[in-house]
Image: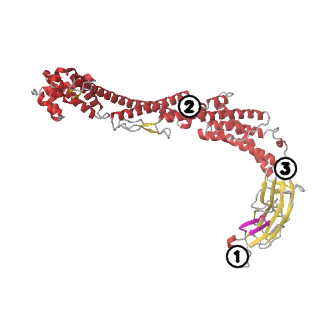
Amino acid sequence: MKTKSTAIILFILLVFGAQGQKIKYKNLYPLLEAKNYEEGIPQLKIFLSDEKNSDEANAHLQMGLWLEERFLDYDVVDDSAALYASGDSAVFYLEKAKTLIDEKELKRNDEYYQSFFRRDLRTGEFGIKVSDVHLDIEKKVEAINTRIADVKEMHRRVVKVENNQKAAMDDYRALTEQYNLYNSLLIGADEDAKSKLANIEENGRAGVENARSVQELADKLGSDKYSDEPTLKNIEQYGVDGMNAANLRSGIIEIWNFEEWAREAQSEIMGGVALFKTMVKNYADEIRDKKAKVKNSQNAEIGEFPENLAGQFEKYDPGSTAEKLLKIEMYEARVTKKVDLQLNPALMDSSLIGSQLAIFEEAFADAKEMKLLVESITSDDLELAKKKYSDYIESFFQKYVTASKYITDMQIWSGRHVSWLGDAVEFWSAKNRWGVDAENEEVRYPLFMQDAPEGGFMTMGVPVKTAEEIVAYGADLSNKMGYVASFGPDRVSKWKLEFELPGTEAVRYESDSIPTIAGSESFYIYNKSSQENNFVVVSYTSSGQLNWGTVVTISKEPVDFKFDELTQELTILLYPEEQLPLDSDELGYVVIDRTGNAR
């Protein structure tokens, strides 16, 4: 670099020398001393271009000082090429001057070196010493060389920052292409992906270190560019942030914080994800063990899919094929257990209609859920799941030739169970719709809500409906009486109570459960077709005792019911409380006391 720059300067000087002007240095020096470089430098170049002046020490010194000043004025970022050239030329002329300045030069031309006139600290005498001149020149040369080295190092560091960012970005982009979602990266990261993450972190760290070195060098060089603290941009949106290269040529250090992103990703993989995968493996082992037991008619508590594991799937892998596979195993185990005759003896007693229906309904619901999950899994899903959960998936399918064979088998299994369980539910549902009178098996009560009478009965309410018991109330239109009855798991009546209906000529009933005295149940029936005795309130116990059935006349359909826990009285409101007709003879409410008397 020095040889090339020097040759350029000498060429320029030769061009000026071709003008053949005769310049006397003693006339030129005052211009240079006064720093009138606009006039002085062109003449100095012409002067030095003459070979006869090649040993003019002060002329070389002045050229070096001028070039040094220019060197210091150049912008270390935008004018680096000119800075290097002027710095190298300044060093050339200063070192040349140093070789020419000796005692003879100082004695002959001492007026040119008055800036070096100083007091000797050892002798106390004032004067100009060759050693002082040489030392000043050496310091200038050293400062120029140091500044050139710092500028070059600063630019090298800028390039390093760009290279660090590019290397990190290349690996980052490769990860986004392989794993389109961040969670997919966390769950499925193989050794190659982990290696890329480590490289991203290292290049990110090196990039930050180099960026800070650039800033420190810029401060040292007094540059207004690169002098601000580096800006580290966080990667918050995976696959969007971190995809564009850093541009540092403008003098601003703004880079992606790949180090932090990669460190957090690796931490999550080694921490939360590792724990999550352990949970997956543990539950897989657990559910397989339980499934094996129930297939051998051994009891095992299957339960629901663990909430904490479901939460982890939602966090790391929503809609995961692995979660579906685990649930398929769970549903298979639950269905197998529910339809096992040894584990559910109720299935062997055909009289237990409610129990049979409850068991088959639960098994049918599980089989349908299982079938939906199986049908939602594709071959591509399985391949992706293998990458994410290699340990679990490989052991999961170890008894199958291929993973897709497992899916095919589960499709057949779930399809068959949905079919026959659906038939069973339909069969037992039909039986569960009717209750038989214990005293007369030919009398059948509808155990479902009706809009119109059927078989002489109209059921208006079913306040209790379990496998063990159904309680229904309504109207027996054949004897024009109301009834409330309890039917056991065989759907034969355990007890039956009768009460007076509020009119039977026309049937337009409204009914519902209402609050009543402690330990009892209550409901009302309102006959909208009758004007007199059109409302009945019935209170009964769960053991089959009728507390009372009170019939009253009301002018309109009730809007609300209020039960007083203290007095045990029921108030039937025909108007909202704030609209009760207090100043008229119109009935606004009816009160029924704890014994069933109305007032």
Q: Where residue 574 sits: x, y (%)?
A: 72, 71
Q: CA distance from mark 1 to mark 2?
A: 76 Å
Q: CA distance from mark 3 to mark 2?
A: 58 Å
Hey, which quadrant is residue 183 in on the image? Answer: top right
Residue 173 lies left or right of residue 34; in this view the side is: right
Label whose residue precedes the other's in the sequence (1 or 2): 2
Looking at the rendered image, the disc whose residue lies closer to the viewer, 1 or 3, is 1
The residue at the point 64 percent across, 37 percent down is 323
**Tag shown at residue 490:** 3
Q: CA distance from mark 1 to mark 3?
A: 51 Å
Magenta span dominant secondary structure: strand
**Tag shown at residue 189:** 2
477 vs 170, nearest the viewer: 170
Image: magenta residue range: 558-572
Neighbours of disc 2 within 10 Å: few (<14), some (14-19), many (20+): many
Label whose residue precedes the other's in the sequence (1 or 3): 3
Q: Where 351 sits versus 169, above or below?
A: below
Residue 13 lies left or right of residue 593; in this view the side is: left
The residue at the point 77 percent across, 49 percent down is 429
Hey, which quadrant is residue 392 in on the image? Answer: top right
